[in-house]
Amino acid sequence: MEKIKISYQKEPVIRNLILSLTGHCNFQCVYCYAAYHPERKMEKEIALKAIDMAGKSGTPFILQFTGGEPLLAFETIQAAVAYVETKNYPAILQLQTNASLMTEEIADYLKTHHIAIGVSLDGRPPVNDALRKTKDGSSASEATIRGIRILASKKIAVGITCVVTSANVHFLPGIVQMAYYLGNVRQIGFDLLRCQGKGEGLAPASPADMALAVEQCYKLSLKLERTTGVHIRFSQLEKIRKITSGKACAFGQCYAMHGEEAYVTSDGKIYACSSLVGNENFLLGDVWHGMDLQKTKIAGEQIAESMRICRECPQLPSCGGGCFTRWLGRTGKAEEECVMQRTFTQFL
């Protein structure tokens, strides 16, 4: 079978820039795949050089602040946002956080600068606290809920990212209940287990359990929407709707495959994806020298070749394809991901 080749007419444009501001975190989640991330805080100079890499094309790009816990490096966020605004770069600003360090001052800043907020939460408190643990033994759920409530008091909407494993798949409707309970959640995304970092020791949800959980979550959301009048989106379903309506191309979500993602660690190294930090095959360069075009091309070809089964699947035009990093460390594809996509497709 002929090997898939990625061809660039010119240097790829960065459409997804992720800054890992620190590998340090006040939580110690059991599935964390940031085990190989340097714990040092990102120097402001590194953040600004990375932003210039993405901003120089003039093409709109996502700029996401993550970690570890990015609010531990809030001053770097401030410097980066000020730089984006000064240079008038077309950046879509996002923050992925556990929200435990949220304050009214930080919330005001995020609202003023139009930074979209994703909060990591894996279910109702007993479930979440079993997966997302704090280092001091206190309740992670209480800390996260406190942060979300501060955001709600400022009328700031958030999205929830829920990591799904065999440990919480049977309790997924609880994340829908939490979303409506909190009041300011407007989107839920399921981040299926990636078998990197600490995730190597955990089991993914079974396909049958995933299908049942997705169906239960969707039906519960409809019921609660009728009761409350609040509509909460599912990110996977929204992606499918964009693809089937022609507003997005199949497999368009994998920026790394097309050389359009730069995941920058706090020491300035550039990787193809957050889950691939520490993997030399996907080290693309650094912020001082830029992305090596040949390395970026080879990484893209490896991802494309590994995902050939998705490219040849008749469901691709509606599914949009899977995530390469969820397949790593397995003998086959992530079946639970395929089932999740097919189940959501039924609700179009």
Image (tube, grey):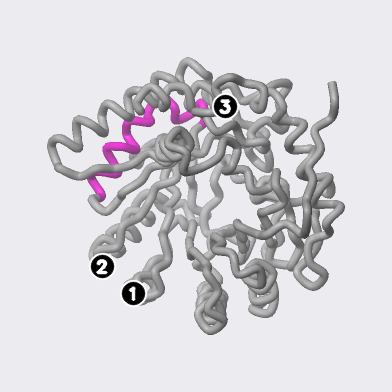
Q: Nearer the viewer, residue 162 or 39?
A: 162
Image coordinates of residue 119 in percent, x first then y, are 42, 53
Calculate the distance from the C-alpha at mark 3 to the C-alpha at mark 2.
40 Å
Residue closer to the observer: 157 or 26: 157
Q: Is residue 200 magenta?
A: no
As shown in the figure, which amino acid type bears the numbered disc 1? Asp
Whether residue 128 appears in this view of the structure is no
Mark 1 or 3: in front is 3
Q: Secondary structure at mark 2?
A: loop
Q: Which residue is mark 1?
A: 108
Q: Secondary structure at mark 1?
A: helix
Report the label total. Answer: 3
Q: Which region shows up in magenta? A: 165-182
Q: Earlier in the sequence, mark 1 or mark 3?
A: 1
> Nearer the N terminus, badge 1 or badge 2?
1
- Give yes or no for residue 177 being in the magenta stretch: yes
- For the residues bearing labels 1 and 2, Cβ distance under 8 angstroms: yes
Query: Label 3, on which residue?
Result: 316
The residue located at (41%, 61%) in the rendering is 116
Looking at this view, name the residue that lies furthest to the top: 208
Marks 1/3: CA–CA distance: 41 Å
Badge 2, how many Cα within 10 Å: few under 14, some, many 20+? some
Residue to which mark 2 is pinned: 154
At 29% from the left and 64% from the top, the residue drawn is: 150
Image quadrant occupied by the N terminus: top right
Q: Amino acid at mark 3?
A: Leu
Residue at image location 54% in from the left, 22% down from the top:
315
Q: Nearer the viewer, residue 8 or 90?
A: 8
Residue 247: x and y, percent? 46, 43
The C terminus lies in which quarter of the figure?
top left
Say whether residue 253 is left or right of residue 212: right
